[in-house]
Image (tube, helix red, strand yellow):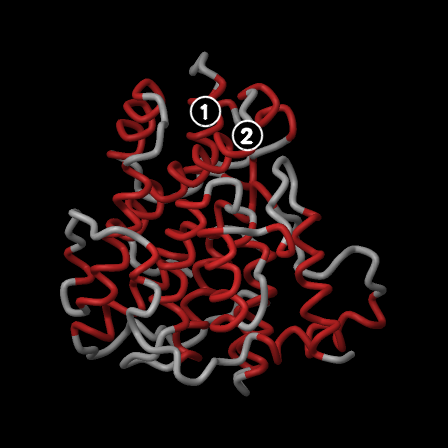
Amino acid sequence: MAPVLVRLALRRAVRDARYVRPVPFGRATGLVRDVYVRLERDFGMLAPPVAVHSPSPAVLAATWVMLRESLVAAGETSRADREIVATLVSRGNSCPYCVEVHGMALDSLGRSAEAAAIVEGRPVADPLAGTLSAGARAELTAVAFAFHYLNRVVSVFLGPSPLPPTVPDSARAKAKAVLGRFLRPVTGASPGDSLELLPVGSRDFAWAAGNPVVEDAFSRASSVFAALPVPSSVRDVVERELSTWDGAPPGLSRSWVDAFDDPAVRLALVVAKAPYQVDDALVAAAGLGDRELVELVGWASFTAAARAVSVAPLRG
């Protein structure tokens, strides 16, 4: 399949999102258009996990800044090691979509053995183990943060696979190989290129202190999430519940959240602690429009990611 046709197919795939209507590439303007163009240029495709944020342009930009400056931009660590971290975190968060995508990326980088081991739940070398410089550790921890965030968003808005269910089993291997080629590292992805999309932030991230660009990127993104119009009644409960959370999933039952009467609180808590438990009824009960839903899910995901990294930078 020609690259142009694949790119067009990926743009159309954004329409398969659940609960929200992402902005189509052809109708994108302003900040959304700017992010879309950069996303295709530096990531290789209009990745649905990023594009689903488009009903809220600021959250879209914050998401891209985190992803680009952690996974895509050149740095001290290899793209393969970053992809291993992304895949391990995604497996730990029960996000099959992200495991499949970043397994394909590892395949395209010649690391098929690691991809297969992660998918099968077998041990692989931990890129965070051993002696790393402060800058390298910041890069890999930033990847873990970004994917604790993205896994939650993907679990809410996307299905279990980046390939449409209409793709037959006999064609999935070839389709994955084609997608993997789009995920190969883009040369010349200079660190910090995306920072201009967001105003300067004010929050410090101790884990990123060894890498000024990563620290700046996540500080800018943090300011976006802090400024979102999430009701204080939701913020207070979620922040309180996460303050003692050890990062472990609460289990298969959703009874742990039944004590909370506010549907928005219930949705935000489930997104934060057990995004695989989000369903149609939970989203419908919150009664939010596209922008408000993206912002609530984004805020809860970012808050949970910050907590997850503080208690366990990498869990696989």
Front-most of 283 and 68?
68
Q: Which residue is mark 2?
A: 253
Q: Position of residue 165 (x, y in %)?
A: 79, 55
Q: Give the quadrant of residue 182.
A: bottom right
Asked whether, in this view, residue 58 is left or right of residue 198, the answer is right
Front-most of 196 and 185?
196
Please report the residue visible at 41 percent of the width from the left and 45 percent of the height from the top.
59
Front-most of 245 and 231?
231
Q: Give the quadrant of residue 105.
A: bottom right
Which quadrant is home to the C terminus? Answer: bottom left
Q: Classify mark 1: helix, strand or loop.
A: helix
Few, some or many residues within 10 Å of mark 2 (<14, 14–19, 20+) = few
Asked whether, in this view, residue 41 is left or right of residue 246, the answer is right
* Relative vertical location of residue 180 with respect to residue 268 in this rendering, above or below: below
Few, some or many residues within 10 Å of mark 1 (<14, 14–19, 20+) = few
Q: Position of residue 190 (x, y in %)?
A: 33, 78
Residue type of the residue flagged with mark 1? Trp
Q: Residue furthest front?
A: 30
Q: Position of residue 28 (x, y in %)?
A: 57, 51
Which quadrant is home to the N terminus? Answer: bottom right
* Relative vertical location of residue 251 with respect to residue 110 in this rendering, above or below: above
Q: Residue furthest top?
A: 261
Residue type of the residue flagged with mark 2? Ser
The answer to whether marks 2 and 1 mark residues whose Cβ atoms lie closer than 8 Å is yes
Asked whether, in this view, residue 261 is left or right of residue 200, the answer is right
Q: Give the quadrant of residue 157.
A: top right
Distance between the Cα atoms at labels 2 and 1?
Answer: 7 Å
Q: Classify mark 2: helix, strand or loop.
A: loop
Tell me the tag on residue 51: none
Q: Which residue is mark 1?
A: 256
Front-most of 89 and 285?
285
Q: Position of residue 297 (x, y in %)?
A: 46, 37
